[in-house]
Amino acid sequence: MTDLTKTDNFLTCDEVRNANSYHLSLNLELLRGCQFSCKGCHVDTYGAKPLTDEWMTQLETWLDSMELEGQYLPTVVFVGPTDFLVADNTIEVLTQPRMIAFLNRFKRLSLQSTLIDLKGFEDIADVLKKNYQQMELEVNILMEPEHVETEKYLQTIHKHRDQLYTYLDWPKLIKSFCIMNVYDYENVKKENIAELLVNYREMHKRVSDLFDTTIDFNFSLSRKHDKLKPGEAQEAIIRVTKMFDTSVDRTNNQFIRFSFGKLTDCLIEKHYNFLNGQWFVSPLLYDRYAAFVEPLRIPMVNYTYQETECFEEALQLNQYENAGNKTECASCRYLGSCIDRNILKVMDIYDIKDCIIARDALDVINERPT
Ligand code: SF4
């Protein structure tokens, strides 16, 4: 069973948490293909085009610039968006010499899998062992919320996780995080499950021995921006907000994985998404928020930190300017934190005026000792 007193919030480890620089986290959308159709998943499984030499050069130029600036520590690099054990091109991506060098500049490599199908995992694990052993490894396990009570499903994931980890025999930390897609849990038909799915504590209890932390909720619907129905994004966000507001209290605020964590966390984390030669700022809405939409796209010409920072400053300013058109933001004590996480921009994208954040949970989280 996980020792919950030792789990972190969003930040990856004490060393990172205590450092004085920005912690750079980059999500690279490079993997293609997935045979599963998990509920609530809106990943375009063939949306990531093969990485060109030109894009690789741009990535390197950008990272050089961020590092040279001296304030950015390459901390976590995610390679997704599909299950790395079943994607068509995992080995191809992870064996490209320039990609190996690029990824190794980060402290931690993060991959995700359903762990449902382990066929041929040894080949991928061998590639990881050969090329990435200097890095910490993190495996995000995508769980289908509706199956948290299905014994056979849980046993399979347990078995596969142990098999994979034993084979990997990783010299540095391997962390397992649980990710669940957000969808309309209240209308789930399966008997007795709807009630369970809106109870964060119970959900966590069911899966806690599988993971090093509590559950992350993934708003995969952010990926189908053009096809969202009016109000759909707001409803989904509020669903998770309610769950946090009713579940976070003084008994669990020390360990709950809540990316809003301390108000100061947002000041040292910088998250970006990369898809097909384009960079996007990633808001932090309980978790990283991958939306490939124009208002979040960083217009790069020279692929420098200056362009990145300049875009983010404009994004901040715009949110302060627009705070007055929301019902409560302008006078809210979390305004600065929400703007740092680009929450007000998310609200603008979906034309949301009312608060979408679990403020009760935030109040409790920020009570905890530092
Ligand atoms: S979204 Fe909610 S918590 Fe954030 S600034 Fe607005 S009112 Fe405050």
Image: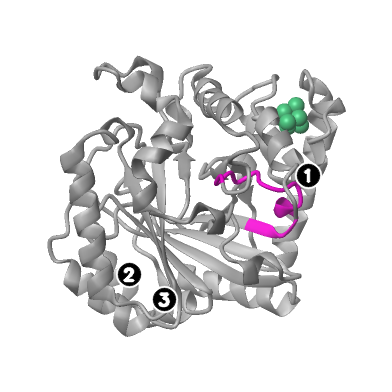
Which residues, given as a range, are shown in magenta? 256-270
User: Label 3, on which residue?
Assistant: 99
| Quadrant housing residue 121 | bottom left
Q: Amino acid at mark 1?
A: Gln
Q: Amino acid at mark 2?
A: Val
Could you tell me which quadrant the C terminus lies in? bottom right
Q: Is residue 261 magenta?
A: yes
Q: In this orientation, which residue lies closer to the viewer: 281 or 142?
A: 142
Question: Which of 303 and 123 lies nearest the eye of the viewer?
Answer: 123
Magenta span has 165?
Answer: no
Residue 294 in view = yes
- Where 189 falls versus 112 (above or below)? above
Mark linked to residue 93: 2
Instruction: Identify the residue under disc 1.
Output: 316
Of the numbered discs 2 and 1, the one sitting upstream in the chain is 2
For mark 1, give the secondary structure.
helix
Mark 1 or mark 3, which is nearer the start of the sequence? 3
Q: Position of residue 94 (x, y in %)?
A: 33, 73
- The amino acid type, in three-letter code, at marker 3 is Met
Q: Residues within 10 Å of mark 1 (few under 14, many from 20)?
A: some
Residue 115 appears left or right of 80: left
